[in-house]
Image (cartoon, rainbow, N blue to C red):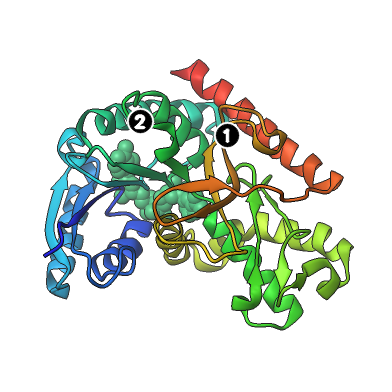
Amino acid sequence: SKKPIRVAITGAAGNIGYALLFRIASGQMFGPDQPVALNLIEIEPGMNALRGVAMELDDCAFPLLTEIVQTSDLNVGFKDVNWALLVGSVPRKQGMERADLLGINGKIFVGQGKAINDNAAADVRILVVGNPCNTNCLIAQKHAPKIPAERWFAMTRLDENRAKTQLAQKASVPVKDIANLCVWGNHSPTMFPDFYNAKISGKPALDVIGDETWLKDTFVPKVGKRGAEIIAARGASSAASAANAVVDTVVSLTTKTAPSEFHSVCVLSSGEYGVPEGIITSLPIKSDGEKWEVVKGVQLTDYAKEQIAKSNQELLDEREMALAAL
Ligand code: NAX
């Protein structure tokens, strides 16, 4: 029988954790024949709730779930993990400056980076979800010298999925007919969902929608502010859709991407498309099932380049603030 894939999830007792764990344990992340072991990591105040979540996992009797580890000790939590999903982080509270938030989380992600470096399996891959996810990912990566830089990811797939649905609804087509929707930049309201390269039923989205003003002035801000819209309606932030995007991201990185498709993943930039080097920024990515690469030859309009540059400038500023606060 197959060796289980060991997955660490931080913030496992939180909202996203509650929507995510059951999907991993049921086989939706690594497939119906792949056993999984879950290393659930929480801070001390979350450990009680975590015990409850673990009991529920037990009560699902998932055939693929071989083991559940519950811990607040990072060295235990990241021991031998093949994937680390870093979901927990400290949310921004009223009166907290952006720099404070970057500083607090920066310190947390230094510790997590070191613990992953020292304990994880040789093939570990890391996806950061906890915000500010791009900069948190960069800080952790910088503190894990043993782990190749291409194993670090941050999540913009929820933004991609949101953008696809907005285009599908506008064009009155099923969402499966939308392709090549790359979100560029930071996972923040400055990200740019590139509608110019998006395809609707194989045709350029711009031709099908026929309204560039709507795309620029309604679609882009709608995607950027979708998180806030969900909070206003639900009284809590996106959880099931965020967990779904985590599953989608890992599936996209571990299976072969369809020939002309690509997906949005934040990776360490090495200067592709004129993006500054050394930031974790969202780019169009495809995978052969093992290795991923940045898709080449995507044409960017001047407007797109301007928007992407603004979002990447925000990442440079975040990096500076986070490093200054360490
Ligand atoms: P919750 O507050 O429900 O859960 C977070 C959990 O993390 C809590 O149980 C808390 O005890 C735990 N935690 C905090 N610090 C920790 C640490 N240092 N180590 C381990 N656990 C820790 O938040 P939830 O709704 O689950 O969201 C989690 C994170 O995802 C937030 O930072 C949120 O901003 C971010 N999001 C990122 C998205 C993305 O697309 N990249 C979208 C959804 C979400 O907003």
Q: Is residue 221 left or right of residue 134?
A: right
Q: Quadrant of residue 172?
A: bottom right
Q: Nearer the viewer, residue 326 or 67?
A: 67
Q: Which mark is residue 108?
A: 2
In the picture, measured across the screen, residue 259 lies left or right of residue 9, that is right
Nearer the observer, 147 or 95: 147
Q: Position of residue 281 (x, y in %)?
A: 58, 39
Q: Quadrant of the N terminus?
A: bottom left
Question: Residue 84 appears in which quarter of the rendering?
Answer: top left
Q: Is mark 2 within 8 Å of ligand 1?
A: yes
Q: Secondary structure at mark 2?
A: helix
**Type of amino acid under label 1:** Ser
Report, in whole angstroms, how far the alpha carbon at label 2 lies from the one at label 1. Answer: 23 Å
User: Are there few (<14), some (14-19), or many (20+) residues within 10 Å of tag 2?
Assistant: some
Q: Position of residue 183 (x, y in %)?
A: 64, 52
Please name which of the two marks, 2 or 1, marks the residue nearer to the observer.
1
| Side of 291 relative to 120 (left or right) | right
